[in-house]
Image: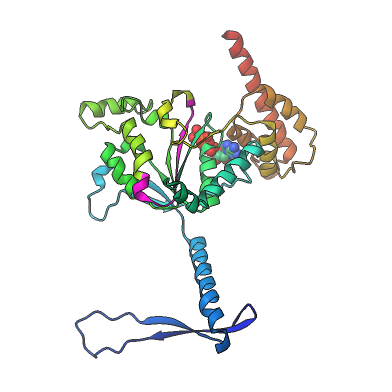
């Protein structure tokens, strides 16, 4: 029994098993399940107009909540046409990252969060302005500053799937198109280290893979995704796909990127992930050591001074703060961080003297 606006409604579940001849060549017909609602007849209008709508909406929300989210990676095209093979393989996406535990300046974090929420609720707005419902983000910053963590937090916030597109295994623009056409709505498509995956002439130049690729080129197997192919897909394919999609490029070297690739409109928002500031450190101390932001620990000021003169990534700070044994308390971890920061700062000092 349920109550809606003071009306009592009784639900009962039923099924219909269709009668079949005792012998049949046809497959067994599915049984039909249905629900019966019982209520006073004077509420008929309220039930058929408002209550059923509410039930359907709630049902959809539950289905979205229970949806198992996926992390997709593209398969090399050589295997696309094998028996039962697909262009994307997936695993369940279960990254615990969220915006609360992401260490970065609070106002920037809020701005990114608001931007995402506005986008995800913007269906009517995008239809009104006649643009495809997509948004591009460029995440840039040194290694270990939380670019991947930020993407996982974004996917968790919006309940989106992730497509991790490895461009180095895509042979040409037409393969790229085929892959992207198969992505589903409510998803984030990532191209990591974009500067290493493509260059202006369309030739690949991923440093680590350079040698291997040169060999591939020799054997005429080299890939030929071009910058213009990538740009076309960003501008054009979306219109054909419909549905909400976010595309994210990450790079450690924003200056290396071609302006055409990152101009506003393609990459709507540029987000800098930077070295660990004191504010970010306080959040990490809360995450890792349960030290509350407002608590003034005597060692915090020492850390503040060191962070002001040393460039260190949040990943390195997190590593120093992490308890290595059960008996390690906050003081031990903070002292380890201070030692690590001091030795980094001394090394940087020596290097600058040599230079
Ligand atoms: N801003 C951050 N807030 C919280 N944790 C962080 C942050 N940055 C890094 N970390 C920690 O460091 C680990 C590595 O960070 P992450 O992989 O997100 O960095 P990245 O910027 O993507 O690095 P790369 O450029 O090398 O891919 C994370 O698993 C996380 O535990």
| 127 vs 311: above or below | below
Q: Position of residue 255 (x, y in %)?
A: 47, 23
Quarter of the image where the C terminus is located: top right
Residue 11 shown left or right of residue 303 in the figure: left
Residue 132 shown left or right of residue 157 in the figure: left
| 74 vs 37: above or below | above
Q: Position of residue 21 (x, y in %)?
A: 24, 90
Q: Position of residue 76 (x, y in %)?
A: 29, 42
Does residue 161 show up?
no
Does residue 204 show up?
yes
Highlighted magenta segment, given as a residue range: 238-254
Query: Which residue is depicted at the point 54% across and 71% down?
Result: 54
Q: Which image quarter: residue 299? A: top right
Quarter of the image where the N terminus is located: bottom right
Instruction: Assign ligand 1 to one image quadrant.
Output: top right
Query: Which residue is depicted at the point 30% across and 33% down?
Result: 225
Residue found farthest to the top: 354
Query: Which residue is depicted at the point 38% across and 86% down?
Result: 16
Q: Position of residue 37 (x, y in %)?
A: 51, 84
Query: Which residue is depicted at the point 42% across and 45% down?
Result: 131
Residue 244 falls inside the magenta stretch = yes
| 353 vs 339: above or below | above
Residue 196 falls inside the magenta stretch = no
Towards the viewer: 308 or 119:
119
Towards the viewer: 125 or 255:
125
Q: Which image quarter: residue 146? A: top right
């Amino acid at each position: 029994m349920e109550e809606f606006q003071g009306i009592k409604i009784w639900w009962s579940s039923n099924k219909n098993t269709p009668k079949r001849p005792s012998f049949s060549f046809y497959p067994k017909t599915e049984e039909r399940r249905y629900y019966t609602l019982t209520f006073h007849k004077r509420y008929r209008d309220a039930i058929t107009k408002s209550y059923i709508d509410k039930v359907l909406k709630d049902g959809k929300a539950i289905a979205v909540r229970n949806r198992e989210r996926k992390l997709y990676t593209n398969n090399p095209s050589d295997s696309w046409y094998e028996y039962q093979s697909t262009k994307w393989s997936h695993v369940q996406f279960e990254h615990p990252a969220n915006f609360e535990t992401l260490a970065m300046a609070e106002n920037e974090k809020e701005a990114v969060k608001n931007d995402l929420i506005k986008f995800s609720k913007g269906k009517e707005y995008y239809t009104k302005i006649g643009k495809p419902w997509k948004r591009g983000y460029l995440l840039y910053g040194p290694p270990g500053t939380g670019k991947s963590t930020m993407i996982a937090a974004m996917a968790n916030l919006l309940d989106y799937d992730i497509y991790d597109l490895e461009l180095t295994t895509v042979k040409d623009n037409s393969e790229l198109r085929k892959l992207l056409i198969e992505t589903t709505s409510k998803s984030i498509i990532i191209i990591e280290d974009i500067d290493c995956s493509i260059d202006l002439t369309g030739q690949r130049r991923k440093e680590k893979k350079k040698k291997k690729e040169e060999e591939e080129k020799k054997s005429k197997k080299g890939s030929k995704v071009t910058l213009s192919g990538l740009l076309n897909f960003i501008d054009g394919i979306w219109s054909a796909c419909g549905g909400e999609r976010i595309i994210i490029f990450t790079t450690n070297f924003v200056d290396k990127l071609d302006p055409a690739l990152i101009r506003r409109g393609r990459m709507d928002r540029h987000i800098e992930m930077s070295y660990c500031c004191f504010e970010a450190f306080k959040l990490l101390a809360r995450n890792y050591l349960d030290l509350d932001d407002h608590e003034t620990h005597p060692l915090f000021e020492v850390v503040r001074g060191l962070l002001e003169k040393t460039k260190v990534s949040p990943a390195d700070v997190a590593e120093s703060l992490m308890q290595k044994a059960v008996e390690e308390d906050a003081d031990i971890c903070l002292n380890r961080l201070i030692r690590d920061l001091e030795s980094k700062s001394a090394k940087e000092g020596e290097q600058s003297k040599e230079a």
